[in-house]
Image (tube, rainbow, N blue to C red):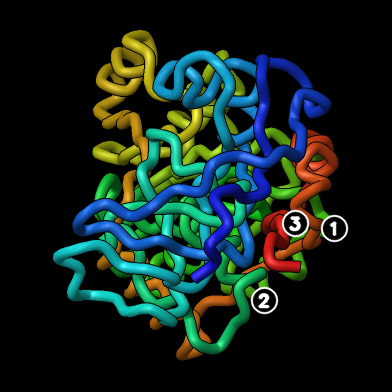
Amino acid sequence: MTSSPTMRAITQDTFGGPDVLRLADVARPEPLPTEVLVRVHAAGVNPVDWKTREGGGMAGVLGEPPFILGWDVSGVVEAVGFGVHTLEVGDEVYGMPWFPRQAGAYTEYVTAPARQFVRKPSTIGHDLAAAVPLAGLTAWQALVDAAGVEPGQRVLIHAAAGGVGHFAVQFAKHLGAYVIGTAREAKHEWLRSLGADELVDYTAVRFEDAVKDVDVVIDLIGDGVEETSTRSLATLRPGGTLVAVPSGVSPELVAAAEARGLVAKPYLVEPDGPSLARIAALIDEGTVRVEVEDVLPLAEAAEAHRRGEQGRTRGKLVLNVAG
């Protein structure tokens, strides 16, 4: 294990645009009992990262800067604390530690409870593995835990080509659902290759005019005014469920859903080692593919945020930390 007391990290001293992110040397953490120290090889970039950077997202949990962003980690266990039995030094692991508290994934080392990490998929490298935890768990928990998707149900996934969306398409198909996605036409062929049964170009038609009799809607857009969620109610059949991921559910949306005999649920992802292990198995057996649009060096975190904020990413953006 390195003896250096410091490590490289992307930190910020104030809320703001991508330029507030800076590369700095910070103190390297040490694992407490039941924790592991993981040398980060790659860190995924997610919308919650840039929302938090600006003062939204999880800023209310993290508090005022300075802090280190990032929750997606893929790396190697470098040290274990007292009481750890599930992992050993040298294990290649991935996870989404501490969410929504600070995990500090945009850095060279992180510490977290050992059971918030599991062995990463063996068939992919760290850059791809780092794209999975937050997006993969969001999709899995929304479909399985929040919506309880069953074989034969019709599932509508908004923003199907994004980081969470492309996992949601594949997981819903794995669960036996008929999968409908909204995405620009240029991404339809790729989404069909992932298992989508039906696709709607939201730039050409209003999705509520094209889609009916849906059992479950997974709204991954979260436009702040809930227009997508509200419009989605018209696509659901009686008894259907809307899971609103980024923006939550207002009392007005709940009332509108109940008036139609529907259920509207808020949702926030949480660390989940067993589900990450299941996702790793699906990846290793070839059932699920991971899409990474680009891998950038840690020092270019600001550029990754600029690109991600444009909302046109296919799959995920990842920061390579190990070099």
* Tags 2 and 1 touching, CB below 8 Å: no
Residue beneath the point at 70% across and 57% down = 318
User: Dot 1: within a 10 Å radius of its alpha carbon, few (fewer than 14), some, or many (20 or more) residues?
Assistant: few
Q: Name the residue under label 3.
A: 314
Q: Which comes sooner in the sequence, label 2 or label 1? A: 1
User: Dot 3: within a 10 Å radius of its alpha carbon, few (fewer than 14), some, or many (20 or more) residues?
Assistant: some
Residue depth check, mark 3 versus mark 2: number of the one nearer the observer? 3
Residue 98 in view: yes
Mark pair 3, 2: CA separation: 14 Å
Q: Where in the figure is residue 228, as x and y percent of width and height?
A: 57, 27
Q: Which residue lies furthest to the left in this view?
A: 83
In front here: 130 or 316?
130
Q: Is 10 left, or right, of 111 in this rendering?
A: right
Q: Mark 2 points at which residue?
A: 193
Q: In which quarter of the image is residue 129?
A: bottom right
Residue 311 in view: no
Q: Which comes sooner in the sequence, label 3 or label 2? A: 2
